[in-house]
Amino acid sequence: MGDAIAFYTLAAFILGFAILVISTRDTVHSILFLVLDFLFVAALYVLLGAEFVAVIQVLVYAGGIVVLYLFVVMLVNLKRPPEVYQDPNRRTRMGYALAGAVLVELAAIATWGYVTPPPPAAAPSAMPVTGNTEQVGWLLYTSYLIPFEVASMLLLVAMIGAIVLAKREL
Amino acid sequence: MVDNFVIPLLQIVIVLNATLVGVTYMVLLERKVIAWAQSRLGPMRVGPYGILQPIADVIKLMIKEDITPARADRWVFTAAPIIAVVPAFIVYAVIPFGETAHLFGRTITLYITDINVGLLYIVSVASVGVYGIILAGYSSNSKYPLLASLRASAQLISYEVAVTLTLVSVILMAGSLSMVSIVHAQRDAGFWFAFVQPIAFGIFLVGGLAETNRAPFDLPEAEQELTGGFHTEYSGMRFALFFLAEYANMIVVSSVATTLFLGGWLRPFPNVAALAFLDVIPDWTWFLAKSFVFLYVFIWVRATLPRYRYDQLMRLGWKFLIPLAIVNLVVTGFVKVLAG
């Protein structure tokens, strides 16, 4: 009962801040709401007993990536009203259609997950280690080794790409 | 009831108040030490040897006029000092000042809590504190604070990488992210990690200076170029909050350095039985003494070294400290595996 109340409160805050992120006119305010949103998502992870993921969420998203967003936003001129940026070739209807498609997709996944039983997750007792961090590490380097390595390769490619784009005459 | 609610609440109140007092007297210590370094006396008027100077300063700051610049981003301008101060204080939740104390027939832990991801919690909360500085500069609607906050954010992001990598080497040594377990690992190993991780220790100290915007890396507050820095437009208590955050962060960095590298609350040479007579001194005294050494070094460095240039700062961070930290991490990993 207490968990349910906490979950729905957090979920309400997360959705509320998410709406504020896309509805605020000031870009810096919108980034601030994004930070708050990430912090509440981290609180949700704590509620689920995933402290490690919660802390990483704050460290990487709230503390790392969004600082870079803010950095970029401060470097561009935002004093002009947003109407100046109005693109004449903007395809508003297509945007709505795509957003609707994503929404339908998410709803389908949620419904599917609701009606089918979840796949058997690795039982905590089956792991040779205890503790939240240790279990995440154990799973990453055993069951999920290949996705983990693929993700790290992807990041490496992105890093090299960024360097190549920034330094043309390397 | 008492164990779950009253004692934690008391612990929080005591730690917060001790930190506030510590911060105000850090300011006095800094003024005194720098004065002595420059053959001056420092504050002498309020109380004997100026010992009441911090109280006078706080009263002055509280009754000063609080100005919000015209066309400033009012909400963000108000929120920025709060965002800077809150992370600086909530990290004290996981810092172990000692092991346990016996008081009125109860065993009380000398830390507020010990969580499984303690060290990561400190790093992540500290990374949120950057927003205070960036937003203060942005919302002031003034050129110098904006430049300062751009500098500050670039500096903090750069040095965060090196500092976090050194922490990973310590985590490898200790095999845990919990602050209490890291001290226990040093007790079981019989040595402080500063002796086996001298490179990580050095990088952590340099990175700690940069992360707290202290001299010689105080470019976000370079008076000559920026008329003050990111807090130029702030006055009164809001201005004081930034300084509160800065000094609280210095105490955090000192405490983390003590816990990770100097054995936390352990006495010197915890494995030498001949020194067991030192155990009559309470363990938290060791912790405070070791942290004080770091705080003194912070001030000493400020009195000694001139400020870095911005390109030198970036070169030091990216081209020297980060590669060195990575090499140190890889070597630590190899040694750890080979030693079994």
Image (cartoon, coloured by chain):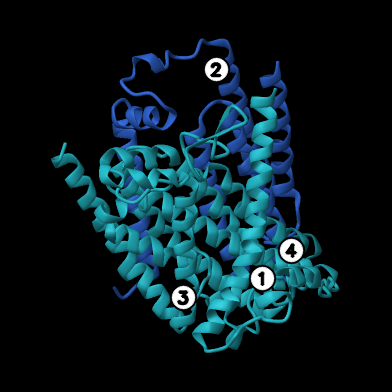
Q: Colour of chain A?
A: blue
Mark number displayed over residue B137: 1
C-alpha distance separating marks 4 and 3: 50 Å
Is B48 situated left or right of A162 in this image? right
Q: Name the residue located 42 percent from the left edge and 17 percent from the top edge.
A: A121
Asked whether A90 or B235 is in front, the reply is B235
Mark number displayed over residue B210: none
Whether B324 is drawn above or below B101: the answer is below
Q: Are marks 1 and 4 on the same chain?
A: no
Q: Name the residue located 44 percent from the left edge and 69 percent from the top edge.
A: B297
C-alpha distance separating marks 2 and 3: 61 Å
Q: Are marks 2 and 3 on the same chain?
A: no
Q: Residues within 10 Å of mark 4 (few under 14, many from 20)?
A: few
**x, y percent for residue B176:** 37, 37
C-alpha distance separating marks 1 and 2: 46 Å
C-alpha distance separating marks 4 and 2: 40 Å
Label 4 is placed on what type of residue?
Pro
Q: Nearer the viewer, mark 1 or mark 2?
A: 1
C-alpha distance separating marks 3 and 1: 28 Å
Asked whether A27 or B232 is in front, the reply is B232
Q: Colour of chain B?
A: cyan
